[in-house]
Amino acid sequence: MAVLVIVAVVVLFLLTTGVRVVQQYERGVVFRLGRVRGTVREPGLTLLVPVLDKMRKVNVQVVTMPVPTQEGITKDNVSVSVDAVLYFRVIEPIRATVDVQNYNFAMLQVAQTSLRSIIGKSELDDLLSGRENLHHDLEVMLESPASGWGVHIDRVEIKDVSLPDSMKRSMARQAEADRERRARIITADGEFQAAAKLAEAAAMMSGTPAALQLRMLQTVVEVAAEKNSTLVLPFPVEMLRFFEASANRLNEGAAAPAAPAPAAPVPAPAVPPQAPAAPIDAD
């Protein structure tokens, strides 16, 4: 009786050790005497041969792996620091278990080296504004080794690009100069259009002098509407022209040489009358 109890306990213990549960997000790789069984155990309850079989569970969820900051020099000789993030998952549990010792560490190292290579092949403008192409190139570079390890690259993205302070100041000055250039161009274009419209208005008003007078009166009304204490009244152009013509006539009359006056006769000097001689006595 005791022997039967011992045998039952041993059998129950072996059955207990041979029962495994595989989660929905896992796959089981079974090794029998060191050799991989051909099939992968799906989620649920699975039975193993006690002592002979060993199972290793592989997570098939998407792994989010941050790639540490990598420093490098771009193609246009700018020193930058770039970090990225990698999304991947295991699609072949057997290869991820047998062909590589630690696929997480392997993917991290490949991502770092690929990121350094991308930095050296790219220019600064590509790192700042053309990241879509860089993401595609990184994915292509990582897909080749990852496919041999049973790993699929879902996505890889560059998170941040750090620039030196001197480069940031240079880019700020460049952006400021570009904005100032565009502001000057817009101002000059506005002045050009305004001058063209004024020229058209002047040509139209020159044909009808009454339009100029109406415009003058309209300006007076606009100024008076502001309730100012001082009213500026434009002077009529015709009156200015009249004054200008009068001044020219006066200037021409003053500039003409005057006729010489006749010489006055010089009077002869007057001879004073002589006194009568005194009589001389003979004595």
Image (cartoon, grey):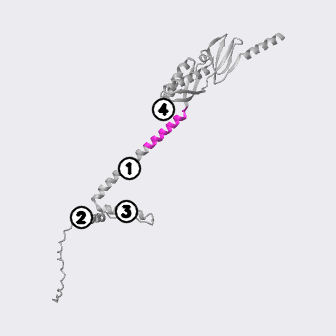
What residue do we see at 69% from left, 19% from top? 20
What's under tag 2, amino acid-wise? Answer: Ala
What's under tag 3, amino acid-wise? Answer: Gln
Element type at marker 3? helix
Check residue 125 in the rendering and tell me which mark sits there, or answer none.
4
Q: Earlier in the sequence, mark 1 or mark 3?
A: 1
Q: Earlier in the sequence, mark 2 or mark 4?
A: 4
Q: CA distance from mark 1 to mark 2?
A: 45 Å
Element type at marker 4? helix
Count residues near mark 1 (Cα–Cα under 10 Å), then give few for <14, some for 14-19, many for 20+: few
What residue do we see at 74% from left, 14% from top? 14
In the picture provided, is 51 more to the left or to the right than 170?
right
| Circle 1 residue | 191
What's under tag 1, amino acid-wise? Answer: Glu
Query: In terms of secondary structure, what is the magenta stretch mainly?
Result: helix
Q: Earlier in the sequence, mark 3 or mark 4?
A: 4
Callout in the foreground (2, 4): 2
Q: Position of residue 73 (x, y in %)?
A: 52, 27
Check residue 218 in the rendering and tell me which mark sits there, or answer none.
3
Q: Which residues are magenta?
A: 161-181
- Quadrant housing the C terminus: bottom left
Nearest the viewer among 244 and 65 is 244
Asked whether residue 46 is in view, the answer is: yes
- Residue 282 sits above or below residue 62 on the image: below
Q: Earlier in the sequence, mark 1 or mark 4?
A: 4
Count residues near mark 2 (Cα–Cα under 10 Å), then give few for <14, some for 14-19, many for 20+: few
Nearest the viewer among 197 and 156 is 197
Count of residue discs? 4
| Circle 2 residue | 255
